[in-house]
Image (spheres, coloured by chain):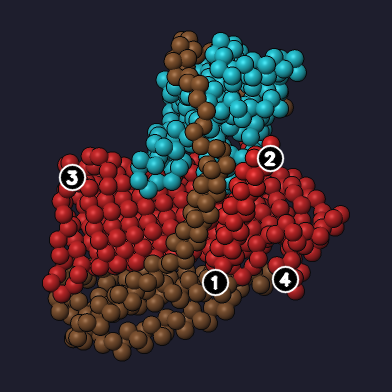
Amino acid sequence: MKRLSIIIAYLLLSLTAVAGTFTLMALTSSTAYAHDHDSDDEDDNGDSRNVNELQPLKADGEVRIDNLAGSVKVLAWDKNQVQVTGRIGHLVQKLDVEGDANSLDIKVVLPHDVHDSDCGSCADLQIQVPKGARLEVSTVSADVEASGLTGQVQVGTVSGGATLSSQSGHIDLRTVSGDITVVGSAKGAQVMANSVSGTVRLSDVDGSVDAENVSGEIKLVSRRVSNLKMSSTSGDLGFQGELVKGGNYDINNVSGDVRVSVGSSPDARFDISSFSGDIDNSFGPKATRVSKYSPGMELHFTSGSGGATLSARTLSGDIRLQN
Amino acid sequence: MQTATAMRMPDLKPQVADNDYSLATRARDGDSKAFEQLYRRYAGRVHAVCLRLAGNKTLAEECTQDAFVKAWESLKNFRGDASFGTWVHRIAVNAVLERHRTQLRQAAWITAGDEELMESVPAVDADPGHGLDLEECIAELPPAARMVFVLFDVEGHSHEEIAGMTGLAVGTSKAHLHRARQILRARLDA
Amino acid sequence: MNQDKLESGLKRLPREVQPGRDLWPGIESRLKARRATQPLWAYSLAASVLVAVAAGGVWVGLGMQKTTTPQEIVAGGANNSAGSGPTDDYFAQRAAYAERSVQTATNLAPATRDVILKNLRIIEGSMQSMQAALDKDPNNPRLRALLFDLYQNEARLLAATQQAQAKTTARNSL
């Protein structure tokens, strides 16, 4: 028993070290000016209010949600109604639900002088919407999660995360430092994911993808993207999947790395170049110098019948092409 | 939206657990016949969770065997405060998840969970199921979605626990669960 | 409310599923009555050390940004003598202009502003080196394509700055 408690003490100590490390990293990483919802700030005992609103909305109606801080969770259902439940902090003036059966605006209203770092101004909302509804959410630090929708989804935050699991045909998620996670889409969807320093993860999407970042990483895993534009300045870019016949893939980076993994026998023409980064190609052909005046390397080759085109370019980041 | 309720596994009745404890004590001292009785008692339960997590009969059988072998080797850690069944069940779940992690590490740089999303997923408008049963549908889910679904809706773990067990982020775990339920509903209701 | 098929299916899911064949013989052959060769505490100590080292490694790794490379780029650019393209002075002015527009985005969180400025400098440094190479080899399409990428990247960065600024401003006037 004593031995066991020593072991547990060791493990707890190292886990504390790890937890402490990650907490410090999180505190020094980029976050928006608005502070995140911190449950320790909650002094709402009895002062926060519950909300419960039910409004009719046609099957493909518009829902717009505006919430500064806290959380927004959108779930799909089969009813032609929108239900808003949850809690609003004691500094929140009110929850406004306005509009008609075509379009509803759900807004957390704060008094002018409220400093959003105090979580009396937070609202945690769960919103059920018709699954074909068109959704637009705008927050600053509130995390946004939405699932089950088939209509278009647009989310904009500053430091809040945006997580979407859907069969939507039109996805547009933008953050400054919040992480973006997309799982699934309709066939032939248009997917846009844009961040400055958040991590962007997209998987199982079908159609056109435009993913851009500045310093955060982007990772795309999908066999059914036919059109890709991926761009960053210093974040690493990764694409794992298959190249669709006739597909067009454009990946460019400045100082971040690019890693592309597209199966053992892709059917594509590859155009790879880097100004001062390394190019590593596991398909055989080696990179050659671009110009005698620059350290740059380039690599152009065709694999299979060359049905798709993939272009990857960096300034100083490394490019790795693997199967 | 209706939420699927988690199926919670109640612990076994005390007298059976006591019996387990005496069997386990004998097995720890090298009595493989006693261990065989424990195997007979819990193989079904362990194999069920392995099969649902792995989606594949062969892998499920391997993992079931691995779990019992591991249990044998760490019998000295089993103190009888949970039922043997619960204990070996936990070992089995870790074994299946560990298998996936090893495979993924071989794909040099993809983190655990992403590569598995590559499995082709039937589109919502694909051929309607012909009275497919739920087990089949679960087996056909993309790996990460399947594992999260089984751990959450069948085994009753929370997203935080699942995050700890699989290495996925909590948000990603939730996204996979929603996706799994979506796909399952589409196939079952078709 | 009616239960959907998923819920009812889950409720009916059997707790046990027997394997298709008897796995015991396979298990029995693998059983060995062996004890751990090392005391448990040695393993857990090793594990704790590994965890602590890994955590430290992650911290250091994350702290080391790719931004160390711009020095190389700028140094590389400086090795080439000024050519017939835009002078270094032009790039310096351009960089100053871009940075000023970021500095005026006062609503951005300081950390975000730092990220943007840092990345702007990466871009500006790269442009100088790129232009120097192009001066020597003006018709090289690869070099031109890379320089064009840089211009696009910078434009995107400044647009993202403005959007982030605007979003926070709009919030302030709610």
Instruction: Name the element at disc 1.
Output: helix
Q: Amino acid at mark 2?
A: Lys
Instruction: Give the residue at mark 3.
Output: A303
Task: Judge left or right: residue C74 versus residue B86.
Answer: left
Residue at 27% of width from left, 47% of height from top?
A322
Check disc 1: other Cα within 10 Å, few if <14, some if 14-19, many if 20+. some
- Residue A263 is drawn in which quadrant? top left
Task: Judge left or right: residue A152 versus residue C125.
Answer: right
Q: Compared to C106, does B86 lie above or below?
A: above
**Which chain wears brown?**
C
- On the image, the x and y values in percent for residue A67 come to 67, 59
Q: Earlier in the sequence, mark 4 or mark 3?
A: 4
Instruction: Give the residue at mark 4.
Output: A115
Check disc 4: other Cα within 10 Å, few if <14, some if 14-19, many if 20+. some
- On the image, the x and y values in percent for residue A280 come to 24, 54
Could you tell me which chain the residue with mark 1 belongs to? C
**Which chain wears red?**
A
Residue at 55% of width from left, 63% of height from top?
A25
- In three-dimensional space, the C-alpha distance between marks 2 and 1, rounded to whole angstroms, equals 47 Å
Disc 2 or disc 1, which is closer to the eye? 2
Q: Earlier in the sequence, mark 2 or mark 4?
A: 2
Residue A2: mark in rendering: 2
Decide which of B16, A251 is in the foreground and name it.
B16
Instruction: Give the residue at mark 1.
Output: C111
What is the display colour for chain B? cyan
